Image (cartoon, helix red, strand yellow):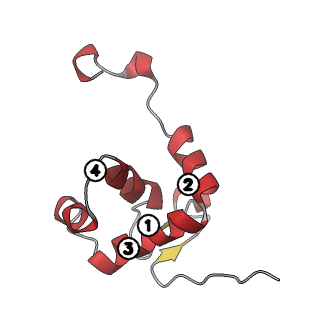
């Protein structure tokens, strides 16, 4: 029997980004935190770049990602900018 995790700072609301997991009280998707983390930013650095978030919110977003990697990876892939749309100097 599995345990259902409850999250204090991560919510899903169909009215916000179509139900994609976001940080409660914001429109910041969990994927945005994960993408910054994947770029090599520490949680402490992420809050510098996203000052509307607390360190606790960032850690919980990463915890959510750990529990639901397939879901979040799907949102990351779905929202990826196609290479044809990226300016050549940014590739």
Given contact means CB atoms under 8 Å apart, are the residues at marks 4 and 2 in contact?
A: no
In three-dimensional space, the C-alpha distance between marks 1 and 2, rounded to whole angstroms, equals 10 Å
- The residue indicated by pointer 4 is 40
Tell me which numbered mark, 1 or 2, is placed earlier along the sequence. Answer: 1
User: Residue 77, located in which quarter of the rendered image?
Assistant: top right
In three-dimensional space, the C-alpha distance between marks 4 and 2, rounded to whole angstroms, equals 18 Å
- The residue indicated by pointer 3 is 59
User: Residue 29, located in which quarter of the rendered image?
Assistant: bottom left
The furthest residue to the left: 48
Relative depth, front residue between 57 and 39:
39
Q: Secondary structure at mark 2?
A: helix
Write the residue at 16% across / 64% down: 48
Q: Secondary structure at mark 3?
A: helix
Q: Residues within 10 Å of mark 1 (few under 14, many from 20)?
A: some
Given contact means CB atoms under 8 Å apart, are the residues at marks 1 and 3 in contact?
A: yes
Does residue 23 show up?
no
């Amino acid at each position: 029997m599995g345990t259902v995790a409850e999250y204090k700072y991560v919510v899903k609301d169909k009215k916000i980004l179509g139900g994609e997991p976001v940080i409660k009280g914001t429109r910041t998707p969990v994927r945005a935190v994960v993408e910054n983390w994947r770029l090599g930013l520490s949680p402490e650095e992420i809050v510098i770049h996203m000052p509307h978030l607390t360190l606790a919110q960032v850690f919980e977003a990463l915890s959510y990602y750990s529990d639901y990697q397939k879901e979040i990876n799907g949102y990351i892939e779905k929202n990826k900018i196609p290479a044809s749309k990226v300016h050549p100097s940014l590739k």
